[in-house]
Image (cartoon, grey):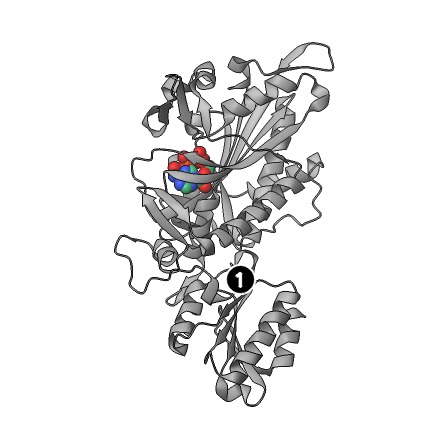
Amino acid sequence: MRLSRFFMPILKENPKEAEIVSHRLMLRSGMVRQQSQGIYSWLPMGKRVLDKVNKIIREEQNRSGAIELLMPTLQSAELWQESGRYDAYGKEMLRIKDRQERPMLYGPTNEEMVTDIFRSYVKSYKNLPLNLYHIQLKFRDEIRPRFGTMRSREFLMKDAYSFDLTKEGAEHSYRKMFAAYLRTFSRLGLRAIPMRADTGPIGGNLSHEFIILADTGESEVFCHKDFVDFDIPAEDTDFDNVAGMQSIFDKWTSVYAATSEMHDEAAFNAIPEGDRLSARGIEVGHIFYFGTKYSEPMGAKVQGPDGKEHVVHMGSYGIGPTRLVPAIIEASHDENGIIWPASVAPFDSVIINMKAGDEACDAASERLYAALGNAGQDVLYDDTDDRAGTKFAAADLIGVPVQVIVGPRSIANGEVELKDRKTGARETLTVEAALNKLTG
Ligand code: ATP
Ligand code: MG
């Protein structure tokens, strides 16, 4: 992508409305724009990152055996009357009427709808277990939307729903998602800690929130510091291995971790003082097992091996991609801007042509741009006629992992400079060597 043809509206001033660093950096780097309170457009730079986050989420959902579909944002109130949640949900639900005066709503979550899909098609235990997920916009009329897309009213959620014949089966499905979440957050460059959680309006009896530690987090959390060193399930993890899933779950729930709602002061104080971690955290995912809470009133049943009808056991599993993007920034930035983990960076590298219009600089930059692109990399080429200082500041701000700096002095010796955004380490190499290093 040539910057001169891209759309990257960088702000020079610090936006006053931004209270936390991720919100400030997302606005400054032109990733998002607020359209009305708590409702955002994702501008091209932000969209690139969001897509990469979603890709990782999808890959790990699919690896664990979940199947993607797409349900609509607008739902009929009737379904929610069946489960009893239409009245229970309260003001966070945006209620709408269509031209026939039929009550509709903008979905805050999809348990009812997916249960309806399930009951319409699945009639036998032979089709179980089943886990269906989608990545779709939700709307919750939050009383206090804030911190940009961290807590917005319209936001993206990956929500998965599992269906099993028995409670034991459902618990295995729960542990599969648990392991998939550990892998997902780790690939996003985050260390998320699963904490026993309250089940809230979704209801149910087994629930974990996945929390990343950050000073700006809204939740108060308490845990053992051993979590920092626990192993993440490997890529070749067998999600159908019941004992294997159990042992991952047992390991990750073996030491104390709880949010303030579930906090047990005595249990926490039993941890040696030096091993206690009391911090603030951001909830990036939340999983629930809730048995037959929706399947019972909505009549989601299958025929079991005994020939009788059984109400299915369900769980639901959420991740917030539009919250994850600022959460990653909270965890990875410095005073100059964002530092993207390579897995979600909007571009793999940025070529900074310090003197656009200079024959040697232009030729070397073009050569690098073409070669890196041909090697399958996502490259941003700053070919604008801004001053070099402005270009350096912009490159630091947008946080692309590698900067390839092409300046008139070094290019006279056939050399360019590589700068690692994270460490700040610089290295001077010939154009050839730089290409080998970046594509090797
Ligand atoms: P919170 O406690 O932060 O209000 P929640 O517990 O109501 O969130 P869940 O129903 O568990 O949220 O939703 C699953 C995931 O969706 C959350 O873990 C979070 O990542 C994301 N999410 C929920 N609400 C918002 C929001 N207002 N803005 C952005 N992401 C959200
Ligand atoms: Mg939650």
Residue at 34% from the left image edge and 57% from the top image edge: 24
Name the residue nearer the viewer: 147 or 47: 47
Q: Quadrant of residue 412?
A: bottom right
On the question of residue 274 being in view, the answer is yes
Residue furthest to the left: 16
On screen, 195 above or below 414?
above
On screen, 38 above or below 334?
above
On the question of residue 259 being in view, the answer is no
Q: Amino acid at mark 1?
A: Phe
Left or right: residue 391 compared with residue 166: left
Residue at 52% from the left image edge and 84% from the top image edge: 359
Per the image, label 1 sits on a secondary structure element best described as: loop
Q: Position of residue 2 (x, y in %)?
A: 51, 66
| Picture mark count | 1
On screen, 262 above or below 212?
above
Residue at 41% from the left image edge and 68% from the top image edge: 394
Q: Position of residue 312 (x, y in %)?
A: 61, 19
Name the residue nearer the viewer: 96 or 231: 96
Residue furthest to the top: 308
Label 1 packing within 10 angstroms: few (<14), some (14-19), many (20+): many
Q: Which residue is mark 1?
A: 347
Q: Position of residue 32 (x, y in %)?
A: 39, 51
Q: Position of residue 44 (x, y in %)?
A: 46, 54
Q: Is mark 1 within 8 Å of ligand 1?
A: no
Name the residue nearer the viewer: 104 or 127: 104
Quarter of the figure that contains the C terminus: bottom right
